[in-house]
């Protein structure tokens, strides 16, 4: 047995099936659902020497009163109408549509506390990568991470092949080390993980300051950073930021964080692009 995300999720599903719970499970495609996730679930039952009821046409696995409904992200809308789901499992969450939780939340209705479990490889820039970072910062979710080198089931040759195939440092950190990379790494000198969590927050005693780094001719990204004392309020990256849209973007960020333009003490602009911004402000 090669231990990975899908194997862990398959054990979670089997445990709930044995408790006769109702489960909704997703994989990225129908093929990955049948050949990966559901295949691993059936292997777990084989290891326990228990025979479940597998309906490949309906993509369900049942045991006594417990049942697991399988869907892919390709047809996630088809899960609407299910209810009394005790457990939601999302395999490769990084590949899920942005509204997957909005679609599935009504399925978790019932007189119980629903459980959500997911497995994913970090994907810098994805909607779920930011969701993970934001929720980890507020401790709203538990995240367990592992790196490829921790997997004792991998041969030395297999690990070396992966190491040699990946030449990009960020991809190595993401794929091999299992790190969740900040979406702002490409644009910022200082990252949020450079600051210890116990950093003294003196933000109440300081006004808002804004820094803008424009992308010039569009060769890189435009970034707006809003700071209040020691606390970074927001770092927002744009593929393109027209000078005429800059003030609107700033006002929207301030509004989202419950500030107004009256709270702003100063705006610092990179002068390579600053003259155009000043003219349009």
Image: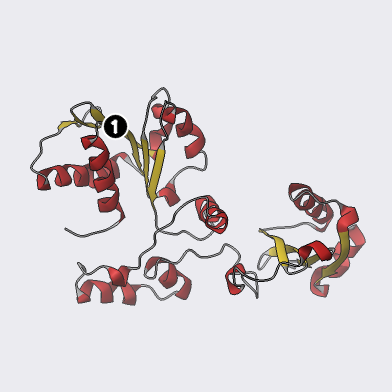
274 horizontally vs 10: left or right? right
Compare residues 67 and 69 and report the one nearer the observer: 67
Residue located 18% across and 27% down the image: 64
What colour-coding does the image apply? secondary structure
Task: Please identify the quadrant where the C terminus is shown.
Answer: bottom right
Q: Is residue 102 above or below residue 243?
A: above
Q: Position of residue 175 (x, y in %)?
A: 39, 66
248 horizontally vs 2: left or right? right
Secondary structure state at the residue bearing disc 1? loop
Disc 1: which residue: 21
Residue located 17% across and 32% down the image: 54
Q: Is residue 71 above or below residue 95?
A: above
Residue located 48% across and 51% down the image: 141
Q: Residue furthest top?
A: 81
Compare residues 247 and 50 and report the one nearer the observer: 50
Q: Position of residue 251 (x, y in %)?
A: 81, 51
Q: Position of residue 169 (x, y in %)?
A: 46, 75
Where residue 151 sits, quadrant-wise, is bottom left
Residue located 47% across and 59% down the image: 123
Task: Please identify the quadrant where the N terminus is shown.
Answer: bottom left
Where residue 268 sits, quadrant-wise, is bottom right
21 horizontally vs 49: left or right? right
Q: Position of residue 95 (x, y in %)?
A: 43, 49
Where residue 233 sits, quadrant-wise, is bottom right
Compare residues 78 and 49 and report the one nearer the observer: 49
Q: Is residue 232 above or below residue 61?
A: below
Instruction: Report if residue 159 is visible in the image.
Output: yes
Instruction: Report if residue 217 is visible in the image.
Output: no
């Amino acid at each position: 047995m090669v231990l990975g995300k899908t194997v862990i999720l398959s054990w979670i599903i089997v445990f709930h099936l044995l408790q006769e719970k109702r489960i909704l499970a997703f994989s990225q495609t129908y093929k990955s659902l049948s050949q990966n996730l559901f295949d691993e679930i059936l292997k777990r039952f084989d290891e326990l020497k228990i025979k479940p009821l597998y309906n490949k046409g309906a993509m369900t696995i049942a045991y006594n009163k417990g049942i697991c409904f399988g869907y892919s992200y390709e047809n996630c809308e088809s899960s609407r109408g299910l209810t009394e789901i005790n457990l939601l499992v999302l395999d490769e969450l990084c590949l899920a549509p942005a509204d997957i939780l909005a679609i599935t939340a009504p399925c978790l209705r019932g007189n119980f506390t629903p459980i959500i479990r997911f497995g994913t490889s970090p994907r810098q820039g994805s909607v779920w990568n930011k969701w993970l970072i934001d929720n980890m910062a507020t401790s709203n979710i538990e995240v367990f991470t592992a790196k490829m080198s921790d997997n004792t089931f991998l041969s030395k040759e297999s690990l070396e092949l992966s190491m040699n195939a990946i030449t990009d440092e960020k991809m190595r950190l993401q794929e091999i080390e299992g790190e969740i990379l900040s979406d702002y790494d490409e644009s910022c000198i200082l990252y949020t993980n450079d600051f210890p969590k116990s950093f003294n927050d003196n933000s109440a005693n300081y006004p808002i300051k804004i820094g803008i780094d424009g992308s010039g001719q569009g060769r890189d990204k435009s970034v707006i950073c809003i700071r209040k004392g020691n606390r970074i309020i927001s770092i927002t990256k744009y593929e393109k930021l027209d000078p005429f849209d800059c003030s609107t973007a700033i006002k929207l960020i301030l509004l989202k964080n419950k500030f107004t333009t009256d709270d702003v003490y100063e705006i610092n602009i990179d002068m390579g692009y600053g003259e155009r911004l000043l003219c349009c402000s």
